[in-house]
């Protein structure tokens, strides 16, 4: 059998991706097959996947080569060879968090500065860009099917605010309950009545934000 797998993303059809904390390995699961190994980049010394699998089977994750800072990678499906995503400017680890059915990927660069990042398909590969923030720190965690992104931005170093970015890249700060000082929007989805984002705030309260159409 396979070593213990830390679960990552889940599709609407029940496919799951995960990674091993004890070896350099990524896995894909379905009820028909169980856990199957995925290809990892040549020379990888660590790989990790979060929620980044879409309903078409495309996957994104981060891997480190020879112990160097991690980069983002894209798999067209669980049998595919990983493709290196372009690195945003700056130094540090690239974290990949989510991918929607249009193939748009989001995450962040974690280094001297922490910046929310988006990778957009351009026909022959991907274009990488930073999402706008307040000049201190930001991170992107989820992308809805319409291209809305959720995450956090900071006004001060240790005070993240939950945030959305519109499909055109406009930054939208979300509110907090009266007993919260900071928070983060970890997931966003499109519903029949509008956008719904969920996350937490500073006192460990679960929070939901509804943005009507």
Image (spheres, helix red, strand yellow):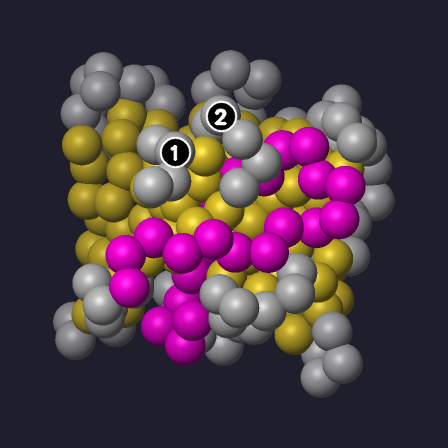
Q: Which residue is mark 2?
A: 22
Task: Name the residue beneath numbered marker 1.
Answer: 3
Q: Nearer the viewer, residue 56 or 209?
A: 56
Image location (x, y in percent) of residue 86: 78, 57
Q: Residue at x 65, y 41 (%)?
A: 63
Residue 31 as seen in the image, left or right of residue 109: left
Q: Residue at x 50, y 47 (%)?
A: 26
Tell me if I can see residue 45 in this picture.
Answer: yes
Instruction: Please say if 64 is above or below 82.
Output: above
Identify which residue, 49 or 169, lies in the foreground.
49
In the rendered view, does 141 fall on the left or right side of 186? right
SS of the residue at dot 2? loop
Q: Foreground residue, 176 or 147? A: 147
Res. 101 image quadrant: bottom left
- Magenta region: 33-58
Q: Which element is circle 1 on?
A: loop
């Amino acid at each position: 059998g396979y070593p213990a797998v830390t679960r990552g993303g889940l599709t609407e059809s029940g496919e799951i991706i995960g990674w091993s904390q004890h070896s350099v390995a990524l896995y894909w699961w379905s009820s028909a097959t169980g856990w199957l190994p995925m290809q990892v980049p040549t020379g990888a010394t660590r790989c990790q996947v979060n929620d980044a699998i879409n309903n078409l089977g495309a996957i994104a994750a981060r891997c480190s080569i020879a112990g160097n800072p991690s980069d983002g990678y894209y798999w067209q499906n669980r049998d595919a060879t990983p493709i290196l995503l372009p690195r945003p400017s700056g130094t540090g680890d690239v974290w990949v968090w989510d991918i929607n059915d249009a193939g748009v990927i989001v995450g962040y660069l974690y280094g001297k500065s922490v910046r929310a990042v988006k990778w957009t398909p351009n026909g022959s590969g991907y274009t990488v860009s930073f999402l706008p923030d307040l000049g201190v720190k930001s991170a992107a965690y989820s992308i809805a099917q319409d291209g809305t992104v959720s995450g956090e931005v900071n006004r001060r170093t240790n005070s993240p605010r939950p945030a959305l970015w519109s499909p055109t890249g406009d930054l939208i700060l979300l509110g907090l309950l009266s007993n919260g000082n900071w928070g983060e929007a970890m997931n966003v989805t499109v519903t029949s009545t509008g956008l719904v984002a969920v996350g937490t705030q500073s006192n460990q309260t679960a929070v939901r934000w509804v943005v009507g159409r």
